[in-house]
Image (tube, grey):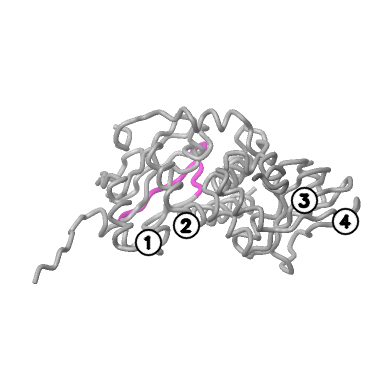
Amino acid sequence: MVFRRTRDPKVEELRGLSLFEDCSPKQLERLGALMDLVELPAGRVLMSEGTGGRECFLITRGKVTVSLDDEELARLGPDEIVGEMALLDNESRSATVIAETPLRALVIDRQRFTTILTLWPGFGQKLLKVLTRRLRAVQSLA
Amino acid sequence: MTRPEVERLRQIPLFSACTASELERLASVGSEVTIEAGTTLMRQGSTDAVECFVITDGEVSVFKDSDRVATLGPGAIVGEMSAVDGLPRSATVVVNTPVRAIRYSSAEFQEVLLASPSAARRVMRVVASRIREAQGSDLDWSPLGSDEFVVAEATEEQSGNGHPSP
């Protein structure tokens, strides 16, 4: 009996993410093909406020620090997304994000981000929830 | 055949990038309402209703802690935060002039997001701009569906792989 089993590491990483929890294994495979898996060292700057943005990161392992004007806004870890705002509105990066520990992340570039939003409306629905949570958090700081 | 409801939807910036079949589907979601001037659409802190409104005519004011923070008109969406997360209203919205709007229950709003990726993206863009505003960046509360966005979306660079910056 042949039991076809892909061991795509990207699919393995995707499996744990709530943004894609409704996706079938087949969909995860197609999604994985639209992303790159990266390992980054602690201290790496993922993005700097005010610069242009061309990708977002889905963190699957490790932690990042999000700051604005040298003030820490948040610490984010596995199952969080960073960098999506500049892809949504084509404005510059709204914050600086630095790897606090060694990091594993799935990277989605601008074009593929749009593709994923179009092909998986559930992703947009969940991402809106993430943004709403962040808006409330920022408003409560203001 | 183009139904008048579909044509009306197409005029709304939130839906202007929708395909014909998306518009057909959206035409049966939500209800058109007329609201008298002076009505309080939602009250900050309230948890009693999780509907949101897309304004098609008229003007509303948004208040936070009794400060007026915005005046919004046709094309604007209000109440989407609670419709998304069910948490208390973050602001009070009062109707300044007679308003026509499409009202979506929380469930209907989720249906809109699923039916139209372009509408979902525009709502996300509105929320993103409010985050930027709350963070104090110098962007204005951007109007929904401004045209430069459509252009930007259409000309998105065909860049290569999404490598992180070196």
The quadrant in which residue A108 appears is top left
The reply to whether dot 3 and dot 2 touch (C-beta < 8 Å) is: no
Q: Where in the figure is residue B37, as x and y percent of width and height?
A: 90, 50
Residue bearing mark 3? B101
Whole-number angstrom distance, CA of label 2 to CA of label 4? 34 Å
Residue bearing mark 1? A23
Foreground: disc 3 or disc 4: 3
Foreground: disc 2 or disc 4: 2
Q: How crowded is mark 2: few (under 14 residues within 10 Å), some or many (20 or more)?
A: many
Residue shown at 63% from the left, 65% from the top: B86
Q: Residue furthest front?
A: B1
Q: Which amino acid does label 1 sit on?
A: Cys
| Magenta stretch, residue numbers | A61-73
Residue bearing mark 4? B39
Compare marks 1 and 2 and give the one earlier in the sequence: 1
Whole-number angstrom distance, CA of label 1 to CA of label 2? 9 Å
Residue shown at 63% from the left, 54% from the top: A140
* Res B50 label: none
Give the chain of mark 3: B
Q: What residue type is labelled 3?
A: Ala
- Element marked by disc 2: helix
Q: Main secondary structure of the magenta part?
A: strand
